Image (cartoon, rainbow, N blue to C red):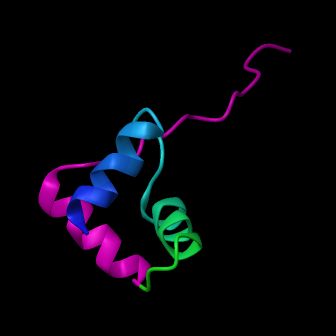
Amino acid sequence: MKAQIKQIYDDSYQNYGAPKITQIIKQNGEIIAEKTVGNYMREMGLKAQYTKPYTTTTK
């Protein structure tokens, strides 16, 4: 399962987090909880990239 999580994570260019990875795994017919995927990702040192929303600072 960890290899599958790593493969999906790398295919998404390190963008996907536990919710999206869980969704893809479930579409492939496997059963796994989002919490479990998150724990595996933490163990392997994988982290989703967070993009800060654009904020206008000038008026």
Residue 40 vertical placement versus 44 (above, below): below
In this view, the residue farthest toward the right is: 59
Residue 38 in the magenta stretch? The answer is yes
Residue sitting at 30 percent across and 79 percent down?
36
Residue 39 vertical placement versus 45 (above, below): below
Residue sitting at 31 percent across and 59 percent down?
4
Q: Position of residue 42 (x, y in %)?
A: 20, 61
- The quadrant holding residue 56 is top right
Residue 35 in the magenta stretch? The answer is yes
Residue span colored magenta:
32-59
Residue 49 vertical placement versus 41 (above, below): above
Depth check, front residue: 46 or 25: 25
In this view, the residue farthest toward the top is: 58
- Judged by its main secondary structure, the magenta piece is loop
Q: Position of residue 47 (x, y in %)?
A: 31, 48
Q: Position of residue 20 (x, y in %)?
A: 54, 60
Q: Quadrant of the N terminus?
A: bottom left
- The quadrant holding residue 10 is top left
Residue sitting at 66 percent across and 35 percent down?
53
Q: Position of residue 59 (x, y in %)?
A: 86, 15
Depth check, front residue: 10 or 17: 10
Depth check, front residue: 25 or 48: 25
Residue sitting at 33 percent across and 71 percent down?
37
- The quadrant holding residue 55 is top right
